[in-house]
Image (cartoon, rainbow, N blue to C red):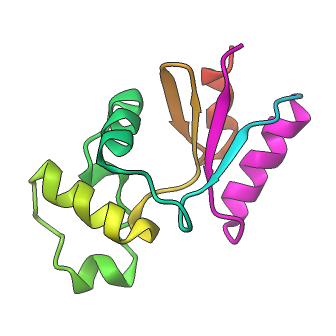
Amino acid sequence: MSQVTIYHNPRCSKSRQTLELLQKNNIEPEIVEYLKTPPNAAELQDILAKLNLSAEQLMRKKETVYKELGLAGINDEDELITAMINNPKLIERPIVISGDKAAIGRPPEAVLDILS
């Protein structure tokens, strides 16, 4: 099995549940606390490609900073990626990556599909 990585926020219950689920399945993922170490543009573009999502689809639209930055209605991928790099709390969580596949752990069981 390829290396598994989780983009993790320890303060998020779904993120903690997803990490626990991986560990129960005997997977010790590389843990990236993305609020402390946000992905760069190339990494974020790679994650989006693996998720098959647009930058807009990966954003947490209920975050205050989303409204403060006026991101609603912006369709420029580079602009949205830059916003997520500069404000990593905008990135939906948790994201689990295994090889060339990725999934968002909402619900946590969603990540099991990419681990086989």
Residue at the image point whose x is 21% and y is 59% from the top: 80
| Residue bounds of the magenta highlight | 1-25
Spot occupied by residue 106 in the image (x, y as percentages of width and height): 58, 48
Residue 59 shown left or right of residue 21 in the figure: left
User: Which quarter shows the C terminus?
Assistant: top right
Is the residue 20 above or below the residue 93 in the image? above
Residue at the image point whose x is 55% and y is 20% from the top: 99
Residue 3 shown left or right of residue 101 in the figure: right
Is the residue 95 above or below the residue 11 in the image? above
Q: Is residue 106 magenta?
A: no
User: Which quarter shows the N terminus?
Assistant: top right
Spot occupied by residue 47 in the image (x, y as percentages of width and height): 41, 37
Residue at the image point whose x is 11% and y is 64% from the top: 73
Is the residue 94 above or below the residue 85 in the image? above
Q: Nearer the viewer, residue 77 or 86?
A: 86
Spot occupied by residue 60 in the image (x, y as percentages of width and height): 39, 65
Quadrant for residue 96, please give it. Answer: top right
Residue at the image point whose x is 39% and y is 41% from the top: 43
Spot occupied by residue 84 in the image (x, y as percentages of width and height): 33, 62
Q: Is residue 14 magenta?
A: yes
Is the residue 62 above or below the residue 37 in the image? below
Q: Nearer the viewer, residue 44 or 14?
A: 44
How many discs appear?
Answer: 0
